[in-house]
Amino acid sequence: MNFEEFVAKPLLAREGIAIPRSEVVTTASEAIQASARLGEVVIKAQVPAGKRGKSGGVKVATDPKTVAKISAQMLEMTIEGHSVKRLLIEERVDISIELYAAVITDTHSKGPLMLFSTQGGIDIEQAAATDAISLRRMPVDIRTGFELSQAIELLDDLSLQGAKPAVADVLVKLYRVWRSQDAELLEINPLAVTNSGKVVALDCKFTLDDLSKPRNSDLAMLGTPDKFTALEEQAHNLGLTFIELNGNIGIIANGAGLTMTTMDAIKHYGGDPANFMEIGGQSYTKAIPAIDIVISNPNVKALVVNFCGAFARTDIMTEGVINAWEKLKPKIPIFFSIHGTGSKVAIPMVRNRLGFEPFETMDDAVKAAILATR
Ligand code: GDP
Ligand code: MN
Protein backbone atom coordinates (compact mmCIF):
# COMPACT_ATOMS: atom_id res chain seq x y z
CA MET A 1 0.00 0.00 0.00
CA ASN A 2 1.26 3.44 -0.98
CA PHE A 3 1.17 6.64 1.01
CA GLU A 4 1.17 10.23 -0.07
CA GLU A 5 3.86 12.68 0.89
CA PHE A 6 1.91 14.39 3.67
CA VAL A 7 1.46 11.05 5.47
CA ALA A 8 4.93 9.69 4.71
CA LYS A 9 7.07 12.65 5.77
CA PRO A 10 5.89 12.80 9.39
CA LEU A 11 7.03 9.17 9.73
CA LEU A 12 10.55 10.40 8.98
CA ALA A 13 10.19 13.29 11.42
CA ARG A 14 9.16 10.97 14.24
CA GLU A 15 12.55 9.29 13.98
CA GLY A 16 14.33 12.65 13.96
CA ILE A 17 14.86 13.34 10.25
CA ALA A 18 14.32 17.04 9.50
CA ILE A 19 11.38 17.92 7.25
CA PRO A 20 10.19 21.42 6.32
CA ARG A 21 7.34 22.93 8.35
CA SER A 22 4.11 22.44 6.43
CA GLU A 23 0.33 22.47 6.47
CA VAL A 24 -2.19 20.43 4.48
CA VAL A 25 -4.95 22.51 2.88
CA THR A 26 -7.92 21.94 0.61
CA THR A 27 -8.72 25.49 -0.56
CA ALA A 28 -6.83 28.50 -1.89
CA SER A 29 -7.83 30.63 1.09
CA GLU A 30 -6.47 28.03 3.51
CA ALA A 31 -3.31 28.06 1.44
CA ILE A 32 -2.96 31.83 1.93
CA GLN A 33 -3.44 31.47 5.68
CA ALA A 34 -0.84 28.72 5.81
CA SER A 35 1.66 30.77 3.84
CA ALA A 36 1.14 33.67 6.24
CA ARG A 37 2.51 31.40 8.96
CA LEU A 38 5.22 29.77 6.84
CA GLY A 39 6.63 32.63 4.72
CA GLU A 40 7.87 31.74 1.24
CA VAL A 41 6.39 28.40 0.38
CA VAL A 42 6.45 25.49 -2.01
CA ILE A 43 2.96 24.35 -3.00
CA LYS A 44 2.75 20.63 -3.60
CA ALA A 45 -0.16 18.65 -5.02
CA GLN A 46 -0.91 15.60 -2.89
CA VAL A 47 -1.56 12.71 -5.25
CA PRO A 48 -0.32 9.14 -5.23
CA ALA A 49 1.97 9.70 -8.21
CA GLY A 50 5.64 10.44 -8.72
CA LYS A 51 7.09 13.18 -10.92
CA ARG A 52 4.64 15.79 -9.73
CA GLY A 53 7.36 18.35 -10.30
CA LYS A 54 7.36 17.66 -14.05
CA SER A 55 3.56 17.74 -14.21
CA GLY A 56 3.31 21.18 -12.62
CA GLY A 57 2.33 19.79 -9.21
CA VAL A 58 5.22 21.42 -7.30
CA LYS A 59 5.59 25.20 -7.42
CA VAL A 60 7.30 27.92 -5.43
CA ALA A 61 5.26 30.94 -4.31
CA THR A 62 6.75 34.02 -2.64
CA ASP A 63 3.70 36.22 -2.03
CA PRO A 64 0.04 35.66 -1.04
CA LYS A 65 -1.29 36.56 -4.49
CA THR A 66 0.83 33.89 -6.15
CA VAL A 67 -0.07 31.41 -3.41
CA ALA A 68 -3.75 31.98 -4.15
CA LYS A 69 -3.32 31.75 -7.90
CA ILE A 70 -1.14 28.62 -7.91
CA SER A 71 -3.26 26.87 -5.27
CA ALA A 72 -6.47 27.51 -7.17
CA GLN A 73 -4.88 26.22 -10.37
CA MET A 74 -3.43 23.15 -8.72
CA LEU A 75 -6.75 22.21 -7.11
CA GLU A 76 -8.21 22.03 -10.62
CA MET A 77 -5.46 19.75 -11.90
CA THR A 78 -5.44 16.04 -12.63
CA ILE A 79 -2.05 14.36 -12.33
CA GLU A 80 -1.66 10.88 -13.79
CA GLY A 81 -5.38 10.33 -13.48
CA HIS A 82 -5.66 11.62 -9.89
CA SER A 83 -7.60 14.80 -9.30
CA VAL A 84 -5.81 17.07 -6.84
CA LYS A 85 -7.88 17.47 -3.67
CA ARG A 86 -5.20 18.45 -1.16
CA LEU A 87 -2.12 20.62 -1.20
CA LEU A 88 0.87 20.56 1.06
CA ILE A 89 1.96 24.12 1.76
CA GLU A 90 5.54 23.86 2.77
CA GLU A 91 8.14 26.30 4.00
CA ARG A 92 10.57 26.91 1.16
CA VAL A 93 14.06 25.51 1.57
CA ASP A 94 17.17 26.89 -0.13
CA ILE A 95 18.69 23.88 -1.77
CA SER A 96 22.43 23.57 -2.24
CA ILE A 97 22.54 19.92 -3.32
CA GLU A 98 19.85 17.33 -3.92
CA LEU A 99 20.62 13.76 -2.81
CA TYR A 100 18.75 10.48 -3.10
CA ALA A 101 18.41 7.99 -0.26
CA ALA A 102 16.24 4.92 -0.04
CA VAL A 103 15.71 1.56 1.56
CA ILE A 104 14.13 -1.00 -0.72
CA THR A 105 13.22 -4.63 -0.27
CA ASP A 106 15.68 -6.40 -2.51
CA THR A 107 14.89 -9.74 -4.06
CA HIS A 108 18.57 -10.49 -4.81
CA SER A 109 19.94 -10.10 -1.30
CA LYS A 110 16.55 -11.15 0.12
CA GLY A 111 16.46 -8.26 2.52
CA PRO A 112 16.72 -4.50 2.84
CA LEU A 113 19.06 -2.68 0.48
CA MET A 114 20.28 0.85 1.21
CA LEU A 115 20.53 3.06 -1.85
CA PHE A 116 22.28 6.38 -2.11
CA SER A 117 23.06 8.82 -4.88
CA THR A 118 24.38 12.36 -5.06
CA GLN A 119 22.10 12.91 -8.05
CA GLY A 120 18.80 13.35 -6.28
CA GLY A 121 15.74 15.18 -7.53
CA ILE A 122 15.57 13.29 -10.79
CA ASP A 123 13.77 10.13 -11.81
CA ILE A 124 16.20 7.65 -10.27
CA GLU A 125 14.69 4.43 -11.63
CA GLN A 126 14.93 5.67 -15.18
CA ALA A 127 18.40 7.13 -14.74
CA ALA A 128 19.70 4.00 -13.00
CA ALA A 129 18.31 1.77 -15.75
CA THR A 130 20.32 3.65 -18.33
CA ASP A 131 23.41 3.89 -16.08
CA ALA A 132 23.15 7.66 -16.31
CA ILE A 133 23.81 8.00 -12.58
CA SER A 134 25.93 6.33 -9.98
CA LEU A 135 23.82 4.63 -7.39
CA ARG A 136 25.52 3.21 -4.31
CA ARG A 137 24.05 0.05 -2.84
CA MET A 138 24.55 -1.72 0.45
CA PRO A 139 22.60 -4.83 1.48
CA VAL A 140 21.64 -4.88 5.14
CA ASP A 141 21.52 -7.91 7.40
CA ILE A 142 18.13 -7.48 9.00
CA ARG A 143 19.35 -9.23 12.18
CA THR A 144 22.04 -6.67 12.88
CA GLY A 145 20.50 -3.62 11.24
CA PHE A 146 22.20 -0.61 9.71
CA GLU A 147 24.65 1.30 11.85
CA LEU A 148 26.47 4.59 11.57
CA SER A 149 29.72 2.88 10.55
CA GLN A 150 27.94 1.30 7.58
CA ALA A 151 26.38 4.62 6.61
CA ILE A 152 29.82 6.22 6.64
CA GLU A 153 31.15 3.37 4.54
CA LEU A 154 28.31 3.84 2.05
CA LEU A 155 29.17 7.54 1.74
CA ASP A 156 32.84 6.65 1.66
CA ASP A 157 34.83 9.22 -0.32
CA LEU A 158 32.07 11.80 -0.70
CA SER A 159 32.37 15.18 0.99
CA LEU A 160 28.78 16.37 0.52
CA GLN A 161 29.83 19.92 1.28
CA GLY A 162 30.65 19.07 4.85
CA ALA A 163 27.25 17.51 5.49
CA LYS A 164 28.49 13.91 5.42
CA PRO A 165 28.00 13.21 9.14
CA ALA A 166 24.47 14.64 8.99
CA VAL A 167 23.64 12.62 5.88
CA ALA A 168 25.01 9.45 7.51
CA ASP A 169 22.79 10.16 10.50
CA VAL A 170 19.76 10.50 8.20
CA LEU A 171 20.57 7.15 6.56
CA VAL A 172 20.64 5.40 9.94
CA LYS A 173 17.32 6.97 10.88
CA LEU A 174 15.86 6.15 7.49
CA TYR A 175 16.63 2.50 8.03
CA ARG A 176 15.02 2.68 11.48
CA VAL A 177 11.83 4.09 9.98
CA TRP A 178 11.88 1.39 7.30
CA ARG A 179 12.15 -1.29 9.97
CA SER A 180 9.72 0.08 12.53
CA GLN A 181 7.05 1.02 9.99
CA ASP A 182 7.13 -2.33 8.15
CA ALA A 183 8.05 -0.54 4.96
CA GLU A 184 8.57 -2.29 1.68
CA LEU A 185 10.06 0.85 0.19
CA LEU A 186 11.08 4.12 1.81
CA GLU A 187 12.62 6.80 -0.33
CA ILE A 188 13.72 10.38 0.17
CA ASN A 189 14.09 12.18 -3.15
CA PRO A 190 15.36 14.79 -2.87
CA LEU A 191 17.22 14.75 0.40
CA ALA A 192 18.42 18.34 0.34
CA VAL A 193 21.54 19.87 1.80
CA THR A 194 20.62 23.51 2.36
CA ASN A 195 22.83 26.52 1.89
CA SER A 196 23.34 26.61 5.64
CA GLY A 197 24.42 22.95 5.68
CA LYS A 198 21.25 21.43 7.11
CA VAL A 199 19.98 18.12 5.74
CA VAL A 200 16.24 18.11 5.05
CA ALA A 201 13.91 15.52 3.50
CA LEU A 202 11.92 17.38 0.83
CA ASP A 203 9.94 14.46 -0.49
CA CYS A 204 9.16 10.97 0.76
CA LYS A 205 7.73 7.87 -0.85
CA PHE A 206 6.56 5.13 1.47
CA THR A 207 5.13 1.72 0.60
CA LEU A 208 3.84 -0.40 3.44
CA ASP A 209 4.28 -4.16 3.33
CA ASP A 210 0.67 -5.27 2.83
CA LEU A 211 1.17 -8.29 5.08
CA SER A 212 1.76 -5.91 7.98
CA LYS A 213 -1.60 -4.16 7.62
CA PRO A 214 -3.18 -5.99 10.58
CA ARG A 215 -0.60 -4.55 12.97
CA ASN A 216 -0.54 -1.15 11.28
CA SER A 217 -4.28 -0.69 10.95
CA ASP A 218 -4.28 2.99 11.96
CA LEU A 219 -1.60 3.81 9.44
CA ALA A 220 -3.21 1.66 6.74
CA MET A 221 -6.36 3.81 6.96
CA LEU A 222 -4.28 6.75 5.69
CA GLY A 223 -2.93 4.86 2.67
CA THR A 224 -4.06 5.05 -0.93
CA PRO A 225 -6.63 2.33 -1.54
CA ASP A 226 -5.79 -0.14 -4.29
CA LYS A 227 -7.24 0.88 -7.61
CA PHE A 228 -9.34 -1.79 -9.28
CA THR A 229 -10.54 -1.88 -12.86
CA ALA A 230 -14.30 -2.22 -13.30
CA LEU A 231 -13.90 -5.95 -13.96
CA GLU A 232 -11.60 -6.42 -10.97
CA GLU A 233 -14.13 -4.62 -8.80
CA GLN A 234 -16.86 -6.93 -10.04
CA ALA A 235 -14.72 -10.03 -9.40
CA HIS A 236 -13.65 -8.74 -6.01
CA ASN A 237 -17.28 -8.31 -4.94
CA LEU A 238 -17.93 -11.92 -5.90
CA GLY A 239 -14.99 -13.08 -3.81
CA LEU A 240 -12.88 -14.04 -6.84
CA THR A 241 -9.14 -13.48 -6.98
CA PHE A 242 -8.79 -11.71 -10.29
CA ILE A 243 -6.26 -9.31 -11.77
CA GLU A 244 -6.49 -7.92 -15.29
CA LEU A 245 -3.39 -7.96 -17.47
CA ASN A 246 -2.66 -6.74 -20.98
CA GLY A 247 -2.40 -9.98 -22.95
CA ASN A 248 -4.89 -12.07 -24.92
CA ILE A 249 -4.87 -15.50 -23.22
CA GLY A 250 -7.28 -15.93 -20.34
CA ILE A 251 -6.34 -18.19 -17.44
CA ILE A 252 -8.39 -20.08 -14.90
CA ALA A 253 -6.48 -22.26 -12.47
CA ASN A 254 -6.66 -23.58 -8.94
CA GLY A 255 -4.19 -22.12 -6.48
CA ALA A 256 -2.25 -18.89 -6.76
CA GLY A 257 1.00 -20.77 -7.40
CA LEU A 258 -0.45 -22.78 -10.26
CA THR A 259 -2.04 -19.67 -11.72
CA MET A 260 1.29 -17.87 -11.69
CA THR A 261 3.03 -20.92 -13.12
CA THR A 262 0.51 -20.89 -15.96
CA MET A 263 1.22 -17.22 -16.55
CA ASP A 264 4.95 -17.96 -16.59
CA ALA A 265 4.45 -20.81 -19.07
CA ILE A 266 2.45 -18.57 -21.39
CA LYS A 267 5.21 -15.96 -21.26
CA HIS A 268 7.86 -18.64 -21.69
CA TYR A 269 6.34 -19.84 -24.95
CA GLY A 270 5.95 -16.32 -26.30
CA GLY A 271 2.34 -15.62 -25.36
CA ASP A 272 0.78 -12.95 -23.20
CA PRO A 273 -1.57 -13.65 -20.28
CA ALA A 274 -4.78 -11.60 -20.13
CA ASN A 275 -5.50 -12.12 -16.46
CA PHE A 276 -4.84 -13.84 -13.18
CA MET A 277 -7.95 -15.76 -12.09
CA GLU A 278 -7.54 -18.21 -9.27
CA ILE A 279 -10.82 -19.92 -8.42
CA GLY A 280 -9.91 -23.47 -7.43
CA GLY A 281 -12.67 -25.22 -5.54
CA GLN A 282 -14.97 -22.30 -6.19
CA SER A 283 -15.08 -23.31 -9.86
CA TYR A 284 -18.04 -25.46 -9.02
CA THR A 285 -20.20 -22.57 -7.87
CA LYS A 286 -18.50 -19.53 -9.36
CA ALA A 287 -17.28 -20.65 -12.79
CA ILE A 288 -20.12 -18.83 -14.59
CA PRO A 289 -19.28 -15.35 -13.29
CA ALA A 290 -15.54 -16.16 -13.38
CA ILE A 291 -15.56 -17.14 -17.05
CA ASP A 292 -17.96 -14.35 -17.86
CA ILE A 293 -15.53 -11.85 -16.35
CA VAL A 294 -12.49 -13.32 -18.09
CA ILE A 295 -14.09 -13.35 -21.56
CA SER A 296 -15.84 -10.01 -21.25
CA ASN A 297 -12.48 -8.47 -22.06
CA PRO A 298 -12.60 -8.41 -25.89
CA ASN A 299 -8.83 -8.90 -26.10
CA VAL A 300 -9.17 -12.45 -24.78
CA LYS A 301 -8.82 -14.85 -27.72
CA ALA A 302 -8.31 -18.16 -25.90
CA LEU A 303 -8.75 -19.61 -22.42
CA VAL A 304 -6.40 -21.98 -20.61
CA VAL A 305 -7.86 -23.97 -17.75
CA ASN A 306 -5.17 -25.52 -15.60
CA PHE A 307 -6.24 -27.76 -12.72
CA CYS A 308 -3.97 -29.74 -10.49
CA GLY A 309 -5.70 -31.69 -7.76
CA ALA A 310 -4.33 -32.74 -4.40
CA PHE A 311 -6.99 -32.12 -1.79
CA ALA A 312 -8.92 -30.19 -4.39
CA ARG A 313 -10.84 -32.46 -6.78
CA THR A 314 -10.33 -31.74 -10.45
CA ASP A 315 -13.55 -33.55 -11.38
CA ILE A 316 -15.61 -31.15 -9.28
CA MET A 317 -13.74 -28.11 -10.61
CA THR A 318 -13.95 -29.32 -14.22
CA GLU A 319 -17.66 -30.01 -13.95
CA GLY A 320 -18.18 -26.44 -12.79
CA VAL A 321 -16.23 -25.06 -15.74
CA ILE A 322 -18.03 -27.29 -18.27
CA ASN A 323 -21.43 -26.30 -16.88
CA ALA A 324 -20.47 -22.67 -17.24
CA TRP A 325 -19.06 -23.22 -20.73
CA GLU A 326 -22.27 -24.92 -21.91
CA LYS A 327 -24.33 -22.13 -20.47
CA LEU A 328 -22.27 -19.15 -21.69
CA LYS A 329 -21.26 -20.69 -25.06
CA PRO A 330 -18.19 -18.44 -25.51
CA LYS A 331 -16.89 -17.95 -29.02
CA ILE A 332 -13.26 -18.57 -28.10
CA PRO A 333 -11.39 -21.89 -27.82
CA ILE A 334 -10.64 -23.43 -24.43
CA PHE A 335 -7.59 -25.53 -23.57
CA PHE A 336 -7.52 -27.85 -20.58
CA SER A 337 -4.70 -29.36 -18.61
CA ILE A 338 -5.95 -31.57 -15.79
CA HIS A 339 -3.83 -33.55 -13.38
CA GLY A 340 -4.09 -35.16 -9.95
CA THR A 341 -7.06 -36.07 -7.82
CA GLY A 342 -10.18 -36.70 -9.87
CA SER A 343 -8.51 -36.44 -13.27
CA LYS A 344 -9.69 -39.95 -14.27
CA VAL A 345 -13.23 -38.60 -14.11
CA ALA A 346 -12.51 -35.06 -15.26
CA ILE A 347 -10.68 -35.94 -18.49
CA PRO A 348 -13.48 -38.13 -19.97
CA MET A 349 -15.95 -35.47 -18.85
CA VAL A 350 -14.26 -32.89 -21.09
CA ARG A 351 -14.07 -35.44 -23.93
CA ASN A 352 -17.74 -36.45 -23.68
CA ARG A 353 -19.38 -33.12 -23.02
CA LEU A 354 -17.19 -30.70 -24.98
CA GLY A 355 -15.96 -33.12 -27.65
CA PHE A 356 -12.19 -32.67 -27.40
CA GLU A 357 -9.24 -33.91 -25.40
CA PRO A 358 -7.54 -32.15 -22.52
CA PHE A 359 -3.80 -31.79 -23.14
CA GLU A 360 -1.19 -34.16 -21.73
CA THR A 361 0.75 -31.35 -20.09
CA MET A 362 0.32 -27.73 -19.10
CA ASP A 363 3.00 -26.82 -21.65
CA ASP A 364 1.02 -28.41 -24.49
CA ALA A 365 -2.19 -26.66 -23.46
CA VAL A 366 -0.39 -23.34 -23.28
CA LYS A 367 1.36 -23.81 -26.64
CA ALA A 368 -1.94 -24.71 -28.31
CA ALA A 369 -3.61 -21.64 -26.83
CA ILE A 370 -0.81 -19.39 -28.09
CA LEU A 371 -1.13 -20.95 -31.55
CA ALA A 372 -4.87 -20.28 -31.52
CA THR A 373 -4.33 -16.59 -30.88
CA ARG A 374 -2.06 -16.14 -33.88
P1 GDP B 1 8.07 14.83 -7.20
O1 GDP B 1 8.38 15.48 -8.52
O2 GDP B 1 6.66 14.31 -7.16
O3 GDP B 1 9.07 13.81 -6.81
O4 GDP B 1 8.09 16.02 -6.12
P2 GDP B 1 9.26 16.54 -5.15
O5 GDP B 1 8.68 16.79 -3.83
O6 GDP B 1 10.44 15.66 -5.20
O7 GDP B 1 9.63 17.96 -5.77
C1 GDP B 1 10.22 18.07 -7.06
C2 GDP B 1 11.34 19.09 -7.02
O8 GDP B 1 10.86 20.33 -6.56
C3 GDP B 1 12.48 18.73 -6.10
O9 GDP B 1 13.40 17.85 -6.68
C4 GDP B 1 13.07 20.08 -5.83
O10 GDP B 1 13.99 20.42 -6.85
C5 GDP B 1 11.89 21.02 -5.89
N1 GDP B 1 11.50 21.39 -4.52
C6 GDP B 1 10.69 20.69 -3.68
N2 GDP B 1 10.61 21.31 -2.47
C7 GDP B 1 11.42 22.40 -2.56
C8 GDP B 1 11.79 23.45 -1.65
O11 GDP B 1 11.39 23.52 -0.50
N3 GDP B 1 12.63 24.41 -2.12
C9 GDP B 1 13.10 24.39 -3.39
N4 GDP B 1 13.91 25.36 -3.79
N5 GDP B 1 12.79 23.43 -4.26
C10 GDP B 1 11.96 22.46 -3.86
MN1 MN C 1 10.51 13.50 -5.38
Image (cartoon, helix red, strand yellow):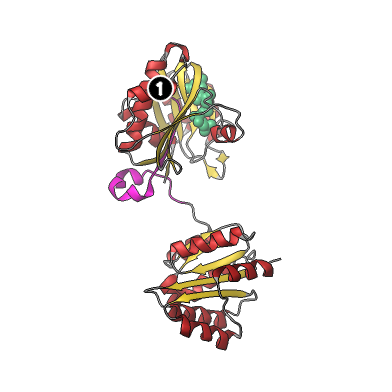
Residue identified by numbered label 1: 153
- The image quarter containing residue 33 is top left
Q: In the picture shown, does residue 50 fall above or below 245? A: above
Seen from this angle, which residue lies furthest left? 215
* Depth check, front residue: 80 or 12: 12
The answer to whether one can see residue 35 in this image is no
Q: In the picture shown, does residue 228 fall above or below 361? A: above
Seen from this angle, which residue lies furthest front? 360
Left or right side of 63 for 131: right
Secondary structure found at label 1: helix
Q: Can residue 223 be found in the magenta stretch?
A: yes
Give the extent of the magenta segment: 201-226
* Depth check, front residue: 301 or 203: 301
Seen from this angle, which residue lies furthest right? 374
Q: Position of residue 368 (x, y in %)?
A: 64, 70
Q: Residues within 10 Å of mark 1 (few under 14, many from 20)?
A: few
Left or right side of 105 for 49: right
The answer to whether one can see residue 41 in this image is yes
The residue shown at (60%, 80%) is 329
Q: Position of residue 115 (x, y in %)?
A: 46, 31
The residue shown at (39%, 74%) is 312
Q: Position of residue 146 (x, y in %)?
A: 34, 30
Q: Position of residue 118 (x, y in %)?
A: 51, 22
* Depth check, front residue: 17 or 52: 17
- The image quarter containing residue 70 is top right
Q: Amino acid at mark 1?
A: Glu
